[in-house]
Image: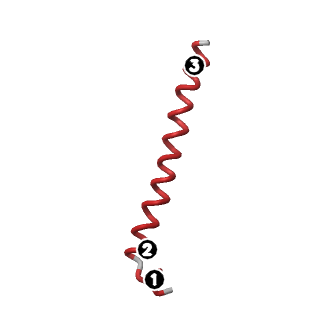
Amino acid sequence: MSDASKSTGKKAPGVIAPVVNLKRARVKPIVPSNALNPFSKSA
């Protein structure tokens, strides 16, 4: 029982961390890319 509890606790944050990072990495580069890239608007 104790092992299962620890395994779930470690898995939950381990999976959430990368998910948040992916969301941030996807949103961050898209905004500045379009704002700083005049070619994007031109094209």
| Identity of the residue drawn at 53% across and 46% down | 19
Question: Quick one: label 1, few (<14), some, or many (20+) residues within 10 Å?
Answer: few
- The image shows residue 4, relative to residue 24, as above or below, that is above
Please, what is the three-letter code of the amino acid marked with disc 1?
A: Lys
Give the spatial CA distance, label 3 vs label 1: 51 Å
Q: Residue 28 falls in which quadrant of the image?
A: bottom left
Please, what is the three-letter code of the amino acid marked with disc 2?
A: Asn
| Identity of the residue drawn at 46% across and 60% down | 27
- Left or right of 28, for residue 11: right
- Left or right of 10, for residue 1: right
- The image shows residue 42, relative to residue 11, as above or below, that is below
Tell me the SS state at disc 2: helix
- The image shows residue 18, relative to residue 40, as above or below, that is above
- Left or right of 29, for residue 11: right
Give the spatial CA distance, label 2 vs label 3: 45 Å
Name the residue that disc number 2 marks. Answer: 34
Among numbered discs 2 and 1, the one appearing first in the sequence: 2
| Identity of the residue drawn at 37% across and 75% down | 36
Name the residue that disc number 1 marks. Answer: 41
Name the residue that disc number 3 marks. Answer: 5
**Residue 9: where, in percent of width, then height?**
53, 26
